[in-house]
Image: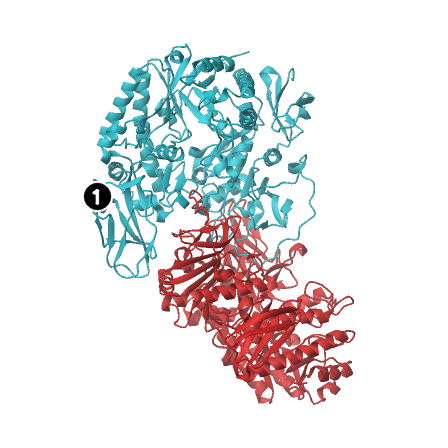
Chain colours: A cyan, B red
Amino acid sequence: MKSGDFTLPGEAGYEGLTLAMAHKWGADCIRDSDGTQLSEEILHSGIAIYSTLCMVRSVNQWARQNMDKLQRNFLSTQPVLAQGETLRIHPLDGFFREQFAICPADDPKEFWQVWDRTAETLHEAWSYDPQTETVTIENAHPFHLYTVSFLAVRIWEEISMYNHITNDWGEKEHLMAVEPRYPETQQALLAFLEKWLKEHPATTVVRFTSLFYNFVWLWGSDPRKRSLLSDWGSYDFTVNPLSLRAFQKEYGYAMTAEDFVNKGKYRITHCVPTHRQRDWMEFTGRFVREFGRQCVDLVHQYGKRAYVFYDDSWIGLEPWNGHFQEFGFDGLIKCVFNAFEARLCAGVKAVETHELRLHPYLFPTGLTGEPTFAPGGHPEKDVKRYWACVRRAMLRVKIDRIGLGGYLHLVEPFPAFQEEMTRIADEFRTLKALHQNGSPWMTGVTVGVLQAWGSIRTWNCAGHMHEHPELPLNHLYEAMAGQPFEVRVLSLEEVAANGVPQEINVLINAGSEGDAWSGGDLWKDPRLLENINRFVAKGGGLLGVKEPSAVRGEMRALALADVLGVEREIGQSICSDRYQPMPPKPHFILEGLTDPPAFANATRGVYALCADTEVLSADCGEPLVAVHAFGKGRAVYLAGFTYSCQNARLLYRTLLWLARKEKLDYLPRSVACECAYFPNDKLLVCINNTAEPVDTVIDTPFGEKQVRVEGEGIAFVPSVG
Amino acid sequence: MKSGDFTLPGEAGYEGLTLAMAHKWGADCIRDSDGTQLSEEILHSGIAIYSTLCMVRSVNQWARQNMDKLQRNFLSTQPVLAQGETLRIHPLDGFFREQFAICPADDPKEFWQVWDRTAETLHEAWSYDPQTETVTIENAHPFHLYTVSFLAVRIWEEISMYNHITNDWGEKEHLMAVEPRYPETQQALLAFLEKWLKEHPATTVVRFTSLFYNFVWLWGSDPRKRSLLSDWGSYDFTVNPLSLRAFQKEYGYAMTAEDFVNKGKYRITHCVPTHRQRDWMEFTGRFVREFGRQCVDLVHQYGKRAYVFYDDSWIGLEPWNGHFQEFGFDGLIKCVFNAFEARLCAGVKAVETHELRLHPYLFPTGLTGEPTFAPGGHPEKDVKRYWACVRRAMLRVKIDRIGLGGYLHLVEPFPAFQEEMTRIADEFRTLKALHQNGSPWMTGVTVGVLQAWGSIRTWNCAGHMHEHPELPLNHLYEAMAGQPFEVRVLSLEEVAANGVPQEINVLINAGSEGDAWSGGDLWKDPRLLENINRFVAKGGGLLGVKEPSAVRGEMRALALADVLGVEREIGQSICSDRYQPMPPKPHFILEGLTDPPAFANATRGVYALCADTEVLSADCGEPLVAVHAFGKGRAVYLAGFTYSCQNARLLYRTLLWLARKEKLDYLPRSVACECAYFPNDKLLVCINNTAEPVDTVIDTPFGEKQVRVEGEGIAFVPSVG
């Protein structure tokens, strides 16, 4: 029985339970959660203390006195039809008035824009009346549509707003997010932090629950459509007069409202970023790191460690953007539903401690309202399932700590959960110890994921899997998170400029037409096509998923069609016959799969372009899995990809085949199971990702190993090698 | 029992049958068919004689002696990867060598092009060796893809080739299509025609089975993909050195191979035409009409009439292109599977005689190999079904003649067919007589179909319904063909330039993103949007179907989204919530429909954009039918449209609602039936479009009329009014 590396959410009033669970689960650290306080008894129990801090909504009194120093963002009205030459628009119409207001200190003529959206031209003849909050447009073009882009100030921080409204908090104070660009705000925040540090001597770790800017979340006035926009990665909330002016000074051009509102569509992370957007991100990221560093330094001055929770607040924090080390954080905490989120956390080199906040969260109900710790709930089953999801990643990489969040008292009536958690904590420590003794065996295959963003979006598109199950790339990450491949993320622009890096064996491009994951117009760069043609023709592998390299107006609707051997119907080849299908032959990729491939997010309308394209699996005559030789290399097309045991195995075999390493070492024959081999321990670790027990055989260079693994269980085969 | 207005295919060797059927069906005209000859007995029976002529493949001996005056076309090779700086491409690789050759008389350097398709640049350093038929490309960019566009000569006319290969004709002569642009060819053709006219004194009508240029039909060398391209409306086969040079002289710019091969995608009719393409069509059409007129004049000189069959050969002949009268044809014959094809024929004002060639064709088997006049066939059922399809149009407009084609002897063992045909011929004559006595009642609603081509493609997209069932516009034409609406076809460019014509009550735009029927980038013209905004805001109606006004890179993915009240998801709004649906309320459009709307070609991913969009019917949360007010006007969105009795009624009600004429005069309550009212005869004519008998009520300003109509039958209610 080991202990340590476990973070427990403590709860005042439940001191006995807190200490009992700490002992049971081997917790070496107790944290508070939103809405909980740790008692003196816990604070002085000798166990290390985490304290959560959300800086920008922590100085609400100061915020109320400095309403011109709140965070801003650009908004665009809905288009309004001009029926004559004069048109009046109320900018705030349609927006949630408790979230947005117009800041009297901001000059509309400096930042606002009026657009003729029918002609897509800027319109100059307009005025704003602050009394009536009305824009009057003169010399309008009748029967054109007009929008007003304006700088709004947010008078309610979104997490506060969401919790308040969801939990019906009534009169409870509306917290506001202050804008840290203002020197006065920085002073106020640093003063708050220093005071706080002084007042919390028992705290050993300050856990920054977020940094300075939330993900964008725009609310509307219509209860039938509350959320107008929500995106984890967007920088919309980083805009304000100060930073707009500073940017222009530094970069020599001005970011305008249109750079953010983008015809009312904004700049969501799922779309291909512009260079101006990237400049703004760089400019803002630098500020976040500089001011973040000041906060971290202050924490360190008080002899405490600084961890950061990477969830609500991504802006400038992105741990894979190449600058994360500048903060000086000691730890990175990631909340995980899925294995790829564990890989996102584990792979960050710039911190010492990588911690996972497991699910279920200790709340009465789950994400979709299902009972978890409420009557009728089975949290012991939920945690087992979540753990089995995430554990796959921990077979491959070392995680340093795990922990829970929420209200600890909820676990009291669920002894089965308490037991299951005990088992999980031990299993985690066992896996960590194995990694500490030496890395597990890898296939030697390095996969390069090609998308528009590059490494800043590594091991994730934008957000959790359940938010956008239509994105094949998150599902691919999920499959690979439990597989022995090296994974690198490459931007299309870097591959266009520099070619495919030497170490890459297989490239993946997986997305839908025009999105950041497929790459949109970036595929119009001939250097990119040339470099990928060269890579594959010389022996590399290419995996295209759903609508890879999709473009319009070019020779092919899939820029890589000639490599992939498939093309997409976008109405331009409906007068051409398709190749009559050949009877499918057995293929390495599909061997051992019990069901035919099926992808819930498969696209329609793709067809075999070349006579030598082999369609291994089809649905209504359209390829689901197709393979094609190109020069000395190989290409595979999948019409979609959703994570499942079957599809993960399909992917595993696909990547081996593409890399010309069709050897199945350390692979359980049952697709339900996965395996890691730790050579220093001569140990095979086999996990069962399904609920049913499995008897299977693992092929190793040291012979076949028979193994039985319980449902969602783990089995160890010693003395291998 | 009436007679006349019926064209019978005669057959030598079956003189008795021919004359018996002529008598039974009331035929006043006997024609030959491909492969049949009329005997002296028939020729001198006193019945008028049609003779079919296909000019350009009628002078094969001359063609063999003038192989440099055969028809040409541009072809593009498949892209080939350059692995080094020299690359060899055999232009004819992949093409059917019995169809295509390279004409030694044509100078490759004058007309051919080599393209770097990776960079999309013309490549200059290449040479051609006629001995080996090889293009050698020097200074190639390694790992770029190259294509060769070349001028091919066709050594086998496509219809001859298809019939030959399909029927396994072995050694039978390959007919070749001569190029009528050459003065020598024209001489040869006119001489042939004159000789023919002299030798056929019994012929009263010369039926030009086609004119000079077939639809494009490119065959490949791979039997797994025989048809590389097939498109009724394309002008690919009109290219040759003479016309290319003449065009340049007249228009001041050269049409190049690329104008035709278009990156290997060619210029199919379903895509938005370019202005250069339109110039070429005008240039070619003028020639077709000039030389066609000479042929017609010659026919007239010999005292015969000249009809033209509009099917295989559209080029320059398009009867709705505004120039059809220049030919001086006396009759237009259209083969019809569907009602819209009857409307296409009937609406052409420039000819005296409008004739339909009915289905089934007198062939042993039908289009898809089903037995028709073969053992097991039920041609009497087939003809009844086809007739019921086409008859709907004849309720609304006058057709002058009907007829059959094929081998008459096949009907001999099918007396039930002989009887059914007798009934149909009489029914036709009854309907024609009603039209002759005065036009039927109309709703007074004029519909404008908006697409890229304009009136040249009236009452048809390109081809028969069964070839492209995915196109909603053909289905809409089919529905409207049997309904009392005026239908006009408008090009997007004319509406952009001149606004919506005064007489239009409802506009329709129905197509898929980027196709000619939706309109593609033509929707980026702000004048177009302004004119439609104005039209609807002032009270007009707009019907958008499938992906109407779909564009990329603009504010909306559907340019008319703000009018229609719906928008399309193309990955740009996946971070926005949708409006929570409202419980649907009863609506005029859906009243009386027995089944919920369903469209086999419905698109996915469209959603309600505006709070006041009413979704009347949805599938998996996505609108199938949505309505929206815009200013004083109304808009309806349908996610697709396929013809059925239900959907035709849905459309009827939609168009009335959009035109604000929600009055159901002369409309049978059963959706199975349709009705025409002939005021001069005070007669209601009610048809049943289904196989089951129907009892229904027709509401008229003169009271309710009860009627029973047999399956696929017709009923007459006299003394109405």
Could you tell whether B49 is left or right of B114 in the image?
A: right
User: Amino acid under label 1?
Assistant: Asp
Q: Position of residue B299 (x, y in %)?
A: 59, 85
What SS does tag 1 mark? Answer: loop
Q: Position of residue A607 (x, y in %)?
A: 59, 50
Q: Quadrant of residue B519?
A: bottom left
Residue B213 appears in the picture as rendered: no
Residue A471 appears in the picture as rendered: yes
Q: Residues within 10 Å of mark 1 (few under 14, many from 20)?
A: few
Residue drawn at x 50%, y 42% is A511
**Is the residue B41 above or below the residue A110 in the image?**
below
Could you tell whether B524 is left or right of B285 in the image?
A: left
Could you tell whether B190 is left or right of A91 in the image?
A: right
Residue drawn at x 21%, y 49% is A129
Is B5 in front, or is A374?
A374
Could you tell whether A617 is left or right of B624 in the image?
A: right
Q: State which quarter of the image contains the N terminus of chain B.
A: bottom right
Q: Quadrant of residue B566?
A: bottom left
Q: Position of residue B240 (x, y in %)?
A: 53, 68
Residue drawn at x 43%, y 63% is B542
Q: Position of residue A297 (x, y in %)?
A: 31, 20
**Is the residue B416 above or below the residue A52 in the image?**
below
Residue farthest along the front direction in this orientation? B703
Q: Quadrant of residue B99?
A: bottom right
Is A604 in front, or is A484?
A604
Count numbered badges in the picture: 1
Identify the chain of the residue marked 1, using the numbered disc in the image.
A
Residue position marked by numbered label 1 in the rendering:
A107
